[in-house]
Amino acid sequence: MIAFATSNKLKFLEAAAIIPGIEPLHLHIPEVQETDVMRVVADKLNFVSKAMLDHAVIVEDTGLYISSWNRLPGALIKWFVDELGTKRLAEIVLADRENATVEAISAVGVWYRGESQVFSGRTAGRIVLPCGDELGWNTIFYYPPSQKTFGEMSFDERLKVSMRRAPLIEAGKWLAERGADAEE
């Protein structure tokens, strides 16, 4: 069995589309408050390694790194969206009209039989006023090649350019090399 420890339905759906047969894992993993997604995922893997699980586990964290904010808020983006809302967050970023560029970075960590590895992926974009279906910061993350926000894209469109895509593919390969099977 390969399990994905997340309570985020979109993240799970993306993982399931890339690693067929993956199962959701309802495991409360304390999350260190840190801007660097790689450090957050390393901490999650440390927790998973102590949980005495007999199957593979995938963890993930995504950060939004705003250029004009010295790459903040990073992995703390959820708290910014919760406190400010996407509209207000976009307005604040857009007040600095010189640079609304942003990079979404995903770190995907995998643990299996005492081994672990972290993979990362990136998608560059711009912050815009909200447009599309509301889910986290998707409505304000504009992906220039598509001329849409993540919130305007269909699931399949977003999956093709998602910052989680490459690291999930790598995690699946890493697990396959070690004999882990989502169908176990």
Image (cartoon, rainbow, N blue to C red):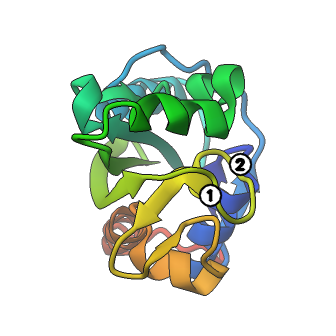
| Residue 181 % position (x, y) | 54, 74
- Residue under label 2, please give it: 8
Circle 1: residue type: Lys
Asked whether the residues under the numbered discs 2 and 1 touch, taking CB atoms below 8 Å apart as contact, a structural biologist would say yes
| Residue 28 % position (x, y) | 72, 27
Residue located at (33% from left, 80% from top):
145
Of 54 and 166, nearer the camera is 166
20 displayed left or right of 69 = right
167 displayed left or right of 134 = left
Residue located at (56% from left, 50% from top):
129
Task: From this view, report whether residue 12 is shown above or below residue 18.
Answer: above
- How dense is the environment of label 1, judged by Cα within 10 Å: few (below 14), some, or many (20 and up)? some
- How dense is the environment of label 2, judged by Cα within 10 Å: few (below 14), some, or many (20 and up)? few
148 displayed left or right of 153 = left
Q: CA distance from mark 2 to mark 1?
A: 5 Å
Question: Does the rendering let one see residue 136?
Answer: yes
Of 34 and 104, nearer the camera is 104
Circle 2: residue type: Asn
Return the residue found at the far bottom. Answer: 156
| SS type, badge 2 | loop
| SS type, badge 1 | helix
Residue located at (34% from left, 59% from top):
125
Question: Does the rendering let one see residue 49?
Answer: no
Residue located at (31% from left, 73% from top):
177
Place residue 71 in its image quadrant.
top left
| Residue 105 % position (x, y) | 34, 48
The circle drawn on residue 129 is none
| Residue 46 % position (x, y) | 42, 25
- Residue under label 1, please give it: 11
